Amino acid sequence: MLDDLHEQVGSTRSARYQERLSAAADALDRGRFGDARRMVQPVLRDLPDVAFAHELAGLASYRLGQWRRAASELERARELDRSIRHHAVLADCYRAMRRYHEVDELWKELKDASPEPALMAEGRIVAAGSLADRGDLAGALKLMQRAMDLPKKPREHHLRQWYVIGDLFDRSGDVVKARRWFGVVAEVDRDFADVVDRLKALGR
């Protein structure tokens, strides 16, 4: 990122823009999404070809529920850096806008790229949710089947996928399997989302 700034504006001005981007990233991490969006605006105005600035703006807009704006920024970031790391969030924006064809295309690109497990998990969750939105719960569960292995040391992305599997079984009317998967999550982390409440609602 710093090299890109140096090339565009020189070392003196790039330090100022770098500071602003770092502040925006910190605001995003702290949940101050409006502030992050505001902080990155001068960089977007002066340096419209900095991918990281568009990424920050897109993520901030996403967390604010501004799907169309987020998708526009993340598409620009993807165009500039040719990265797949935006795909899961971008797909979720399109899912929120019911643009399911774009969700399917992004999932295919992500799956073909075979990224690190956490990013693959996020893409899988969005793709499955998109199928469920269209009433294809069986297809959603089939897509999540690869996530049904139980590793010895579960990580956050495993819990997120298992929770989704539990939710899909619940929506499908399979109470027994829904209980099982919510139970698997609770065994690892009882404070994960509302998993305890989901189990209580299912009579466990």
Image (cartoon, rainbow, N blue to C red):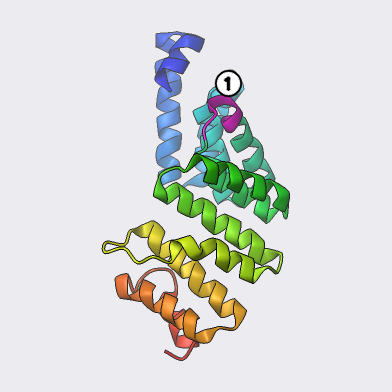
- x and y percent of residue 53 in the render? 52, 29
Q: Does the magenta segment cover residue 17?
A: no
Up-down relation of residue 42 to residue 25 (above or below):
above
Which residue is rendered at x = 45% and y = 8% of the image? 10
What is the chief secondary structure element of the magenta stretch?
helix
Q: Is residue 12 above or below residue 172?
A: above
What residue would you read off at disc 1?
49
Q: Quadrant of the N terminus?
A: top left
| Magenta-drawn segment | 77-83
Q: Is residue 82 magenta?
A: yes
- Amino acid bearing label 1: Asp
Q: Where in the figure is residue 88, as x and y percent of width and height? A: 54, 47
Q: Which residue lies at the image location 57% right of the left edge and 25% below the top edge?
A: 80
Task: Using the image, determine if residue 124 lies above or below residue 141.
Answer: above
Asked if residue 185 shows in the view, the reply is yes
Image height check: is 131 above or below 57?
below
